[in-house]
Amino acid sequence: MEKMRNGEENKTLMNGEAKAEPETFRQFLYNKEKGTVLGRTGTSWCQITVFYIIFYIFLSAFFIGCLAIFLKTLDPKVPRFYGKGTIIGVNPGVGYQPWLKENPDSTLIKFNLQDSKSWEPYVKQLDGYFSRYNNTNDTRECGAGDSNEALQTDPDSLPCRFDLGLFEKANCGAKDQYGFKSGKPCVVVSLNRLIGWRPVDYDGSSVPEEIKSRYKSGSIAINCEGATPFDKEHLGKVKYIPEAGIDGRYYPYVFLPSYQQPIAMVKFDTIPRNKLVIVECRAYASNIEHDVSTRLGMVYFELFVEDKKPVAAPAA
């Protein structure tokens, strides 16, 4: 056995073959004998660096080219996919103001009649909301028979100017602090903007009972009531401005910087003091569906009007 092992060793030495020792990690980082760094020579590193520079230049150029072609197919004024069968859909949502951005998850409108600071955030929010209507450039005065119908076909047509005078006359304007000071808060109700959407009139016999006395052809009627029997009992008198709701002549909506969104306001004349009331407001037109589970065509918010001495803040 010993002779066989010695014979194999002698054979290896005679053939000039030496047993290779495994490379250490330090030698992998830098091998002085082979002149390699991380297993590559300087020439190899130059070759692979040039290859990847050229590769990523072509890859970036390909990506930029594809992106440019894709952007050329988009219209900055109209979503690529909208209407029936898309996530946008054809049923407009309903929104309200004042909605405080500082507390976006809350739908509570709460203030104290004896503390003017409590309603200041709501007044400030509505001031900012209505400021967009101050710019009347590139708009036109529209009469009873006018509409925004031409906006879809005539690029030179101007959108109708929305008149805020109705709200001022109903004591729902800025000078009356939108009714908050008197304890008769006015809440803005609006529809989400859907490209090309316009209200469809009800047939004479299909107008819902709750809006029948106020319904006007061409408009979107608004109806607000308590969300529960308790809320319905305590909501009190509600006034709609204008009475017919959102004026339909400002539709269809078209993306224009000067477009002024039509709105209506709801004034709560006899909202009770120191009671929380949940309000449900619905928009009505033949092509507006209502779904309580997804809140399609409706919006909820809470009103809480306090009438008590404010608690003084503790001294620091």
Image: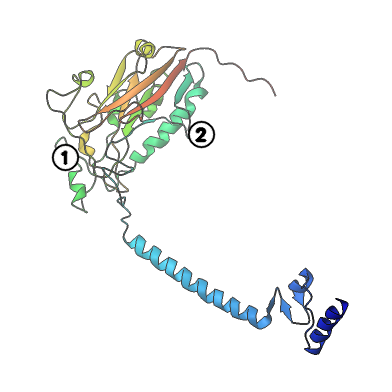
Tell me if I can see residue 223 in this picture.
Answer: yes
Numbered circle sitting on residue 22: none
Q: Secondary structure at mark 2?
A: loop
At horizontal 45% and vertical 71% (from top left) the residue drawn is 61
Numbered circle sitting on residue 102: 2
Which residue is nearer to you in this view: 280 or 136?
280
Mark 2 Cα-neighbour bin, 10 Å: few <14, some 14–19, many ≥20 = few
Residue at image mark 1: 146
Please, is residue 150 above or below residue 186 in the view? below
Which residue is nearer to you in this view: 149 or 226?
226
Quadrant housing residue 302: top left
| The residue positioned farthest toward the front in the image shown | 1
The percent coordinates of residue 283 (x first, y second) are: 27, 28
Q: Earlier in the sequence, mark 2 or mark 1?
A: 2
Position of the N terminus, as image quadrant, is bottom right
Which residue is nearer to you in this view: 313 or 100?
100
Which residue is nearer to you in this view: 28 or 66?
28
At horizontal 40% and vertical 68% (from top left) the residue drawn is 65
Quadrant housing residue 161: top left
